[in-house]
Amino acid sequence: MTSRLSCLLCLLALLGCPGTPTPQPGGSANYSGSLGDGPDFSDASGLIQVQTWFEYGETALQGSFADGPPLRFHVESQREGNCRLMTYTAEACTPACVGGEQCIQGQCVAYPERMDRGDLVWTWPDGEETVEPDDLGGYWATGAAETAGEVSISVDGLELEAPTIDAPAEVGSWENALRSRGNADATLRWSNPILDARIRLHMTDCIATHGGIAAAEIECEGPDTGELIVADAFLDALEAGDWTHGECGSHTFQRYHSAATDGDDTVRFETVGNGGLYYYP
């Protein structure tokens, strides 16, 4: 019996068990590092992100500042664990909205206005660049990246920094986990969780991919534990949407660090590692 048990344990070790790995140190940033176990679905008025792809030796900066958070057409209809189901119902305001305002929950709401904060100095382990805002107030730049380390931005008296971060390393197949779940929740796993990092998942359908507003979307956010459970009912609602076009499902799975000025999280700086997620029901 002991011999059989030993052989079984050796076989499991070779095959790899689906247990959740322990997050390893990898640096942190003050905002994301201070968050607890629950999800953070708050929106910043200004957001600058730096994404790094070490396997390609590339990094990119993008973002903008505004006088308010982005408009949200969806409302939270249900929450389970670190995920929530977001739904949208078309409606018309009386009187009708004018001047580019949008009707959201019976009220006409204006889009936030971009703020020009001048040139932004972006520094990362392999370089430094001064980035000017474009005509629409957005920032965009690219660079070469081979070295892990601290990344910083400095603009209009604002100075924030966060360490580079790798993408989550998929265990098994996330697509298969979603597709073969049956009537059970789907569990997405990755092998390299990072202490004090965060993850976020966003899933939508063909309508949103092609510029419309999906009837249902899924949002998840939480600590980087190496595992995320997505409710079967949420996926059913997503799959009931429009999937009749090509190039559907603008899904994103990100791991990130987030920095903000102490006492003011309306403007944030994030370093991001993008995990690829393809799913077409």
Image (cartoon, rainbow, N blue to C red):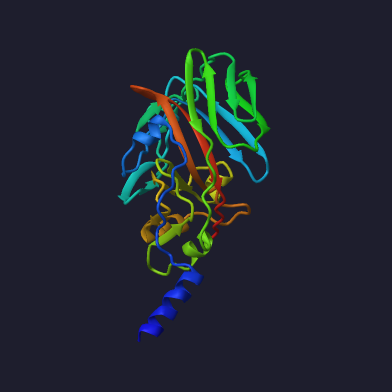
Q: Residue at x 46, y 70 (%)?
A: 13
In the rendered view of the protein, which quadrant contains the N terminus? Answer: bottom left
The residue at the far front in this view is 3
Asked if residue 188 lies left or right of residue 81, the reply is right
Q: Residue at x 42, y 70 (%)?
A: 182
Nearer to the camera, 243 or 38: 38
Residue 200, x across and y down, in percent: 44, 44
Nearer to the camera, 190 or 13: 13
Q: Is residue 42 above or below residue 209?
A: above
Nearer to the camera, 172 or 229: 172
Q: Is residue 231 above or below residue 119?
A: below
Q: Residue at x 50, y 25 (%)?
A: 100
**Quarter residue 232 falls in:** bottom left
Residue 128, x across and y down, in percent: 63, 23
Asked if residue 120 lies left or right of residue 82, the reply is right
Nearer to the camera, 180 or 58: 58
Q: Residue at x 45, y 57 (%)?
A: 188
Residue 94, x across and y down, in percent: 37, 29
Q: Is residue 171 above or below residue 29?
A: below
Q: How many numbered callouts? A: 0
**Does residue 112 show up?**
yes
Residue 160, x across and y down, in percent: 47, 23
**Does residue 105 show up?**
no
